[in-house]
Amino acid sequence: MQLNSKGRNKLNKFVLVGGVLILLLLVNNTRYSNALETSMPKSAASALDGIQQAEAAGAEVSELINRLNNAMDLLEQAETSDFRSCNSYDECIQSADKMFVDIANDAAMSKQQTENVKNEELASSVLYAIIVAFVISFLALSLYRLGKQYQMQRFLDMEIREK
Amino acid sequence: MPSSSILSGIKGIIQSKQFVVVFGLLAAIFSLATYTATLAEQREEFASLSTLGSDMKSAGYFPNDERTIHQGDKMEWQIRIHNGMDNAEYFSVRIKLLNSTQIIPNDTLNQPSPETQILELKHMVTKNSTWTVPFEWNIKQADREQDYVIIREVTVNGKDISNLNVRNLNGQNFKVVLELWRYDLDANDFVFAWTSGHDTRSVWNQIWFNVKA
């Protein structure tokens, strides 16, 4: 009797763990199939993000966008089995993936270069502003002092006349 | 005037408290103005979708401008998407063929039509630019069953799309609905509505037609 009850307990635990595992597997599968519908591969999302960041930094991204559209077209060819510029599903996916990685790298580089140029431009603009401020302050003060000097000279040159 | 007195004059000005105050103020104002000028201008973001006829006008959608079409009649439309967002955007145009009772997108709730698309066109568009894509279609097979006309197969941009079953009484009031979706990296998916300032926006078009079978 004792052995039977232990055996039942074990069986219950086994069923419980098995059930949880199957449930987890189902949930994961559902997520995966939902994700397959419209979400893009990680490399594509990273390329898209890279382009958007580069553009936000002020970089010229039209060439990168053309390349991204071409890579997306390869993905579509793979998904629809309509092979126009690649020969098989694997070839399309691999080519697209490589293009996405290159685009992400180029976008990051473009962003960095643009930021460097912008920082240099900002620094030189601020320097120019400081120089202009210096010159204006100096000229304004010089004129003020000259005016004062002139007034003083006029005062000193005045003659006192008795009526 | 001897050069030494000029130099001492300049030195006197530069070392004066007045100069330090004026220069400090002007330098701060000019630097701030320079920095502000480099900041991006805040503007309202938008995206637009327009469906045009064969002459790139909002007319001439159907042969002979007749809203009632027949099997095989060719429609040559152009879809134009303008990206007025702050960034390049990856757009998707989802084209749906609906009958008069099927649910269209909801402008108030910014929800898309729940019906399945017959075609999806995707493209990344640079900011402040327009993507124009041809949308050439015709009804390849439409059957009449009692009082209903059923669209079974259409050809869009050279591709046959079959297994359709869109039916309407007497073939009246079919709709082509075009929805504009944009890819949201945070959601890792296309989204139908997006926020612009405090508002939520969505964009879609619909064109009605009748079918004679």
Image (cartoon, coloured by chain):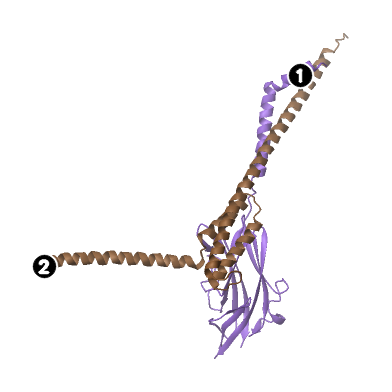
Q: How far apart, in angstroms, are the residues tagged by discs 1 and 2?
A: 114 Å
Q: Which chain is purple?
A: B
Residue that appears at 55% across and 67% down: A92
Graded by Cα atoms within 10 Å as few (under 14), some (14 to 19) or many (20 or more), the crowding at tag 2 reads: few
- Give the vertical position of B6 relative to A113 (above or below): above
In which quadrant of the rendered view does residue B144 lie? bottom right
Residue B211 % position (x, y)? 62, 84
Residue nearer the viewer, A156 or A40: A40
Q: Looking at numbered disc 1 in the image, what kind of residue is underneath it?
A: Leu
Place residue B192 in its image quadrant. Answer: bottom right
Q: Please report the residue visible at 76 percent of the width from the left and 21 percent of the height from the top.
A: A145
Q: Position of residue B151 (x, y in %)?
A: 57, 83
Say what amino acid the circle numbered 2 marks.
Met
User: Which of pointers 1 and 2 indicates the residue nearer the eye?
Assistant: 2
Q: Which chain is brown?
A: A
Q: Quadrant of residue A160?
A: top right
Residue B207 visible in rendering: yes
| Quadrant for the N terminus of chain A in the image | bottom left
Q: Secondary structure at mark 1?
A: helix
Percent x, y of residue A134:
71, 29
For residue A1, the mark is: 2
Name the residue at the top extreme. Answer: A162
Would you name the residue on which mark 1 appears?
Answer: B7
In percent of width and height, residue B157 lies at: 63, 75
Q: Chain of mark 1?
A: B
Q: Nearer the viewer, residue B175 or A74?
A: A74
